[in-house]
Image (cartoon, grey):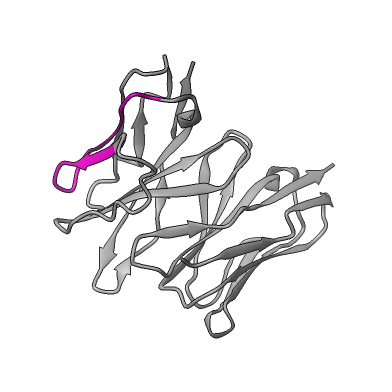
Amino acid sequence: GIQVEQSPPDLILQEGANSTLRCNFSDSVNNLQWFHQNPWGQLINLFYIPSGTKQNGRLSATTVATERYSLLYISSSQTTDSGVYFCAVDGDSWGKFQFGAGTQVVVTP
Amino acid sequence: GAGVSQSPSNKVTEKGKDVELRCDPISGHTALYWYRQRLGQGLEFLIYFQGNSAPDKSGLPSDRFSAERTGESVSTLTIQRTQQEDSAVYLCASSLAGAGGPYEQYFGPGTRLTVT
């Protein structure tokens, strides 16, 4: 099945710093989403981005489907950005989403 | 409803008992998904329902696990003869879907299952 790798596995940032999270996938995909899992366990949609670039406030994402990767940019990080960021793709078959292992982000004041 | 809801929020059960977990998707969402998340790990796909099509059950880990969905409404995930390794958070998501496949998933808060 499709493999999804996220990097880095852990990231410690000082408030105000910028960062880039990466998601590599092993085959072509139909859909790609980025999620933020907050410290209470709730998964929050960030981007639905099978291709192209999107921006939402301090966050933006780019997916280059032909090169099988997606990037999530966090600018001017805040402590509320702490949590785990997951990338999920469906490529093997529609609806069968494969999640990466996540990037654990800690933003310190 | 406003979002995906799941019940119960927490369930503690004894090894060997059966449990039933419920998911109410966003109204109008034809696609529904179940995932399992063990402590400190990522999400594992369990099953995907889309409209009246046969569900994709390829992620169910054993025949002790089953799921049903009533039309495009509520879904139940049943675990029979629970084992300690079934302890995890079970997450449900729903989405719209079209000819090109499913769209953006929205997740419920999850059910935390503890098997003692």
Q: Residue at x 83, y 58 (%)?
A: A17
On the picture, is A36 further left or further right than B22?
right
Name the spot of residue B16 as percent of width and height, x first.
Answer: 36, 18
Query: Is residue B101 or residue A15 the one in the foreground?
Result: B101
Q: The magenta stretch spans which residues?
A: B66-82
Name the spot of residue A36 as percent of width and height, x first.
Answer: 58, 50
Image quarter in which the N terminus of chain B is found: top left
Classify B73 as above or below B102. above
On the picture, is A20 further left or further right than A29?
right
Q: Residue at x 50, y 76 (%)?
A: A27
Query: Is residue B102 or residue A58 the one in the foreground?
Result: B102
Query: Is residue B109 among the parts visible in the rendering?
Result: no
Q: Residue at x 82, y 54 (%)?
A: A16
Q: Residue at x 45, y 31 (%)?
A: B86
Name the spot of residue A30 as percent of width and height, x first.
Answer: 40, 73
Is residue B31 inside the magenta stretch? no
Classify B87 as above or below A62. above
Identify the image quadrant of residue A18. bottom right
Classify A46 as above or below B5. below
